[in-house]
Amino acid sequence: TPDEDVEGGIVYLNEVRIRLGLPVVDYDEATSRHCARHGLYINRHGRAYAHHEDPKHRDYDEKAARAGAQSVISMGPKTCAGGCRNLLNTFLHRIPLLQPRLETVGLARVGAVVLYEYRTGRTRDPEAYEWTDPILYPPDEARDVPLNWPGESPRFYRFNPLRGGSPITATFPPGAKVTDAEFVLSRGGRSMAFYIWTPEDPAHEMWPDNMNSVSVFPKVMLAPDTEYGCQLRCRVSGE
């Protein structure tokens, strides 16, 4: 049974998924235990071991190491829900948590390290959810959107992320070929400058299809209590 903090992290993620029209996820107790052990390992050995463990270390644990390799990790939050909010305010780490076929997650917080393990739970029957439309984040009419982007690792950008706005993503179903992406970002009817990565021009060589996503980063911080407009045009599988 998850404690109150972990339960809050599951609830936070599911509230977001429900708003996006995605199925909710369940808590995986066994995977969460492995996450907790890897969180302890990170606290002992440092952030350099965020996604792996050294077999030469006396506290090496094969299942914990696997959990670390299969998790998205937030460093610094005081709650699991805060960790989820931080991860959703990214590009690379957001996408796994918003996969429609994600059925369960492992979740643990050790100190200021929050781990969401997602690969073990990516088992939902494809026929149980027909994924046809792109997943847009933030969702339409979202409020309380973070004003800036703290950056993430691996570093795939050559600019100071703290000066820019929170990422905007459109993630397409597997097999959908996305080409000729054009994006318009506006505030008060005026166009805004942004950075953009697409399946044709990916952010990092580790993800040659850009996670089948169009990802946009405003070049300036977002303003509070302000409405922004986004328009994406692209071809999907030639159409």
Image: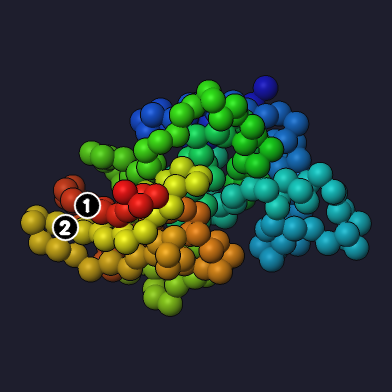
Q: Which mark is residue 231?
A: 1
Amino acid on which the number 2 mark rests in the picture: Ser
Residue 140 percent coordinates (x, y): 26, 39
- In this orientation, which residue lies closer to the viewer: 239 or 114? 239
Q: Circle 2 sits on which residue?
A: 186
Which residue appears farthest toward the left when viewing the image? 189
Mark 2 and mark 1: span between their CA atoms?
Answer: 9 Å
Residue 90 percent coordinates (x, y): 44, 55
Side of 111 where 96 appears, left or right: left
**Disc 2: CA contacts within 10 A as few (<14), some (14-19) or many (>=20):** some
Eyeballing the image, is 27 above or below 82? above
Side of 212 where 219 appears, left or right: left
- Which of pointers 2 and 1 indicates the residue nearer the eye? 1
Residue 206 percent coordinates (x, y): 59, 65
CB within 8 Å, label 2 to label 1: yes
User: Is residue 169 something one can see in this rendering?
Assistant: no
**Disc 1: CA contacts within 10 A as few (<14), some (14-19) or many (>=20):** few
Rendering colour mode:
rainbow
Which residue appears farthest toward the bottom when viewing the image? 158
**Toward which corner of the image does residue 5 lie, by quadrant?**
top right
Amino acid on which the number 1 mark rests in the picture: Gln
